[in-house]
Amino acid sequence: MTSQPSLPYTARSTADDVIEGVDLTGRRAVITGGASGIGLVTARTLAKAGADVTLAVRDPRAVRQAAEEIRAVSRAVGRADAVHVARLDLADRDSIAAFISAWAGPLHILVNNAGIMALPALARTPEGWESQFATNHLGHAALTLGLHGALVSGEASRVVQVASSAHLMAPVDFDDIHFERRPYEAWTAYAQSKTAMVLFTTALAERWRRDGVTVNALHPGGIMTNLQRHLDDAQLALVGAKDSTGTTLEVPPGWKTPEQGAATSVLLAASPLVAGITGRYFEDSAVAPVQPEPAAGKNGVAPYAIDHRLADRLFEETVRLLGGGTVQMTPTR
């Protein structure tokens, strides 16, 4: 097992703090959902360090302002043509396939950041998959598996899975992942999709260790972004995003700014302090402890999210649902 890194950061550290002194010139990065929230901060920070950055988004036309903001940062460090925008809809398998097919050359950093949360009503993809599981896990899994060759050729490449402490609310229900028999519940669906992301991290870390590709997951903390768009007033009040007068707070007590929320993503994507670390779950820019009694509102990583047997089962189910592929599927441990 890889040793525990000793890191000098806290929950209040920012993306700029963890990137200080890092030069990413010559490194290519893809950030899903990289035009808003912590994805935007992550993309901007990596560009500031010299990386060639691709924003993978559903509607490239809608993110021109964000792209120009990142291009300005990139030009300031002498990289005139180092920011790109490409279409990627994680709920659309043809879109994912097109993105993979269009990618040429090595890839050094893949930040699986995009996601949807707590859809109030059950929604399904054309395949019949529950939308949160399909978008948050299966879409990113298909993208990551499809870019395996590019990641290997990148050398010392890193995959960063933006999960959530919500995974502590529910394991993956392998008997009914897509709510075909059990009643749909928005937070349970979101929670199991994030558990799946952590399990997939565990599975890929073992399978790709010999390829020199590291895979880590993280909880960014509570941040007010577009991710909360499906929450009603009562839910916002429950999580502390509204004050006693009903006013929505820009930064609720105990929550983070986007710059603080992106810190752990940037740490795992770029810091030499975590070079070679793989298969771990981070929060507050540090390796998270195992939480022996998982529940909402707690910290740490659930035992069921890092269980190798469950990780193998999730990996096999993921490959089955996606229809296989050309990626090496044999465990290396």
Image (tube, grey):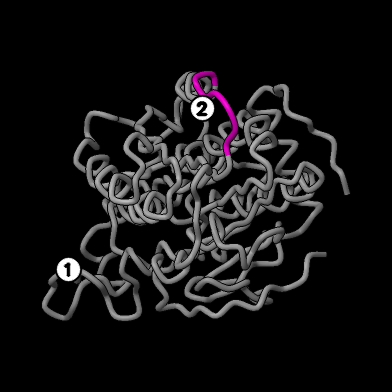
Q: Position of residue 320 (x, y in %)?
A: 70, 28
Foreground pick, 254 / 282: 282
Mark 2 or mark 1, which has the lower sequence index?
Answer: 2
Label 2 CA crowd tier, 10 Å (few <14, some 14–19, many 20+): few
Nearest-to-viewer mark from 2 and 1: 1
Report the residue at 40% width, 78% height from top. 12
How far apart, in angstroms, are the residues tagged by discs 2 and 1?
35 Å
Residue 128's disc is 2
What span is colored magenta in the figure? 101-107
Q: Residue at x 70, y 46 (%)?
A: 213
Q: Name the residue at 53% across, 41% down.
A: 179
Which quadrant holds the N terminus? bottom right
In this rendering, the answer to whether 106 lies above or below 195 is above
What residue would you read off at disc 1?
248
What secondary structure is found at the residue carrying circle 1?
loop
- Mark 2 residue type: Gly
Neighbour tally class for label 1: few under 14, some 14-19, many 20 plus, Cα within 10 Å: some
Q: Secondary structure at mark 2?
A: loop
| Magenta span contains residue 100 | no
Q: Are marks 2 and 1 in contact (CB under 8 Å)?
A: no
